[in-house]
Amino acid sequence: MIVTGKAHKVGDHIDTDAIIPARYLVTTDTAELGSHFMEGIAADWNARVSKNDVLVAGENFGCGSSREHAPLAVLGAGIPVVVAKSFARIFYRNGFNMGLTLLEVGEDADKLRDGDQLEVDTKSGVIRNLTTGESVRCAPVPPSMQELVDAGGLVAYVKNRLAKGDH
């Protein structure tokens, strides 16, 4: 998958309550959750985001409570991929289970600035900064995780396999 969009940068230890505040956990509607994406950081955050933009985070992105709503809010805001120094482990798994692509780039996340235009190739693990001309490399998305993303998440993946008699 190749995604081209503007980088939106956040810092370290962004927790799931900042990604989607608890008062919105009464729904699993992706669009509704997306309309409140990052309200815990800034009330107007979502207005800055366009479809296919890329979230660039620091360390331990998605820490805090284990809520599947957080990756759904990211997707609902139109962001198909998050690039970070590191992810909280439960968020990492929940992200792929919900169909969100996540790439860990370590300290190279510092080379990506807020507002830079990025081209992210999840298959090769290359993130091209179209603004500066630099590239960042990371491990590509493992094929088993890419299958989950391609299916639209774990539930859709399992439904597809069961429908094919693949069990």
Image (tube, rainbow, N blue to C red):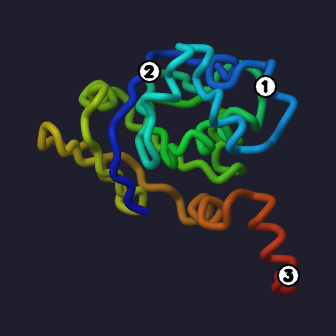
Image quadrant of residue 164?
A: bottom right
Q: CA distance from mark 1 to mark 3?
A: 33 Å
Residue at 71% from the left image edge and 44% from the top image edge: 30
Q: Position of residue 37 (x, y in %)?
A: 61, 29
- Left or right: residue 112 versus residue 71 is left
The quarter of the rendered structure image containing the C terminus is bottom right
Q: Position of residue 92 (x, y in %)?
A: 62, 39
Image height of 87 relative to 131, above or below: above
Q: Position of residue 104 (x, y in %)?
A: 45, 38
Nearer-the-camera pick, 28 or 66 = 28
Residue 103 appearing in the image: yes
Residue underneath mark 3: 163
Q: Residues within 10 Å of mark 2 (few under 14, many from 20)?
A: some
Q: Secondary structure at mark 2?
A: loop
The quarter of the rendered structure image containing the N terminus is bottom left
Q: CA distance from mark 2 to mark 3?
A: 40 Å
Q: Amino acid at mark 2?
A: Val
Q: Amino acid at mark 3?
A: Ala
Residue at 43% from the left image edge and 55% from the top image edge: 140
Residue underneath mark 2: 10
Q: Residues within 10 Å of mark 1 (few under 14, many from 20)?
A: some
Image quadrant of residue 115?
A: top left
Rendered image: mark on residue 105: none
Rendered image: mark on residue 24: 1
Q: Amino acid at mark 1?
A: Tyr
Residue at 60% from the left image edge and 66% from the top image edge: 150
